Amino acid sequence: MSHTSRSRIPIRCALLVTPLAIGAVACAGSPSDPLADKPYDAAEQVVFNGDPHGRQADPDQPLEVTAKGGGSRITDVTATDATGRYLRGELTADGKRWRSTAPLAAGAHYTLRVSTENADGRPGRRTISYDTAPADKSLRVRFGPDSGTYGVGQPVTAELSAPVRNREDQATVERALRVSSRPAVEGAWHWVDDRSLHYRPRAYWPARATITVRSHLDGIKVAGGLYGGPTKPLTLRTGARIEAVTDAAAHRMTVRRDGRTLRTIPVTTGKPGFDTRNGVKVVLAKESFVRMRGTSIGIAEGSSESYDLPVHWATRVTWSGEYVHAAPWSAGSHGAANVSHGCTGMSTANARWFFDTVRPGDLVTVTGSGGTTMTPFDNGFGDWNLSWDKWRQGSALTAGPRHGGDPADAARLRPAI
């Protein structure tokens, strides 16, 4: 056994040595091959725009590398930022100049790795770093709502720290605001005005989904001296699909969870002249007690329509004061007549149950009322009252005019009971 082991050792050595010997002969046989030389420092063959030694580059100007000398040329340039993302660029056909073609980020660190070739074909290398100057002004984004669990109708909002009016600049912002969900759904941003955007899916969010919102605007040029700033990401979750549908003509509200009816509730809605708004609304907040006064909606104190009432178990669906709430003073009209000033009233027990069942983001829809349709943006979240085609018209990435709420509607908004 020991004799066999010793006899194998020379064989192994021969197999290892032979390729090395062949390699050594090959190298020795072509000492003048320029490709076999170690790349030299190409510092004398290339010039960079600006001064990379201690001075910050202007982010509004492209990075450029130029070959010096008649026989020298650039063969390749790789530019990356501190996170490893590549900066696009273009090299001229003669290899004399490379120039970045994508916007630079402000306050960023870039590394350029340049490959060259001299008149004899010898390869050169040069690596250099640039820091771009910080932005004169930062555009910051605040996503909403706060992290938490919401109903499937909750839109995502983005509030900008400065107005962005130009459509191309809006497209730059919109491309950088990323929304993803598990499970994945189709969705889009809609510019409400020059400082705010809403994001919603084509249909409602799936129940029990996770939604992640991030901005990639940091350092990106938006307009003039305006660059994106850092933004805190947002994670939301959806609960069960809760839908409350009120048929104002039949004086009934049906509440469903994940398609299954939980309860049918006798209600009263707005009387003529104070009709409840039709359409899809989203629960904004829940208030266990609210004091409602007619003077807040322009009703003169002492008139026949005047009121001053303590209201319990109030679920808010518009900022102007439309609620679903307990209305024991109108118990005789629940399920029979519409006598409120615009709110949806019900018994105290049913109002408490509704209050405990829904959460912000849940859907509250009214049909059969004589009122106008809930406006999309100026009185809560009426986003779902726009068709998908009209919603996408509000994206800066889609051709076509915006479609938002009519400013004149603001004059018609009113709190109600």
Image (cartoon, helix red, strand yellow):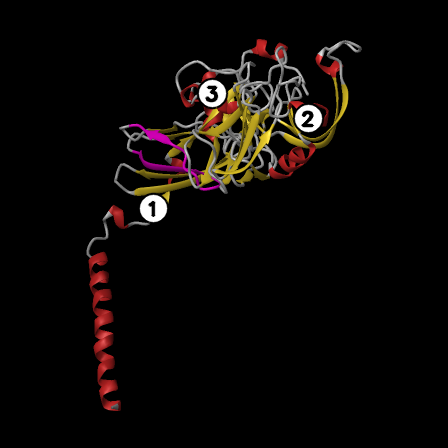
Q: Is residue 308 left or right of residue 93?
A: right
Residue count near mark 1 (Cα–Cα under 10 Å), binned few <14, some 14–19, many ≥20: some
The answer to whether residue 59 shows anywhere in this view is: no
Kind of residue sitting beneath label 1: Pro
The reply to whether callout 3 and callout 1 are in contact (CB within 8 Å) is: no
Residue shown at 23% from the left, 48% from the top: 33
* Circle 3 residue: 386
- Of 362 and 20, the residue lying toward us: 362
Mark in the foreground, 3 or 1: 3
Q: Which region shows up in magenta?
A: 72-92
* Circle 1 residue: 39
Image quadrant in which you'd find residue 310: top right
Kind of residue sitting beneath label 3: Leu
Kind of residue sitting beneath label 2: Ala
Residue shown at 58% from the left, 36% from the top: 232
Q: Quadrant of the N terminus?
A: bottom left
Percent from the top left, x then y, of residue 37? 30, 49
| Label placed on residue 15 | none
Please report whichever mark, 2 or 1, sits nearer to the chain's N-terminal start.
Answer: 1
- Of 167 and 320, the residue lying toward us: 320
| Label placed on residue 331 | 2
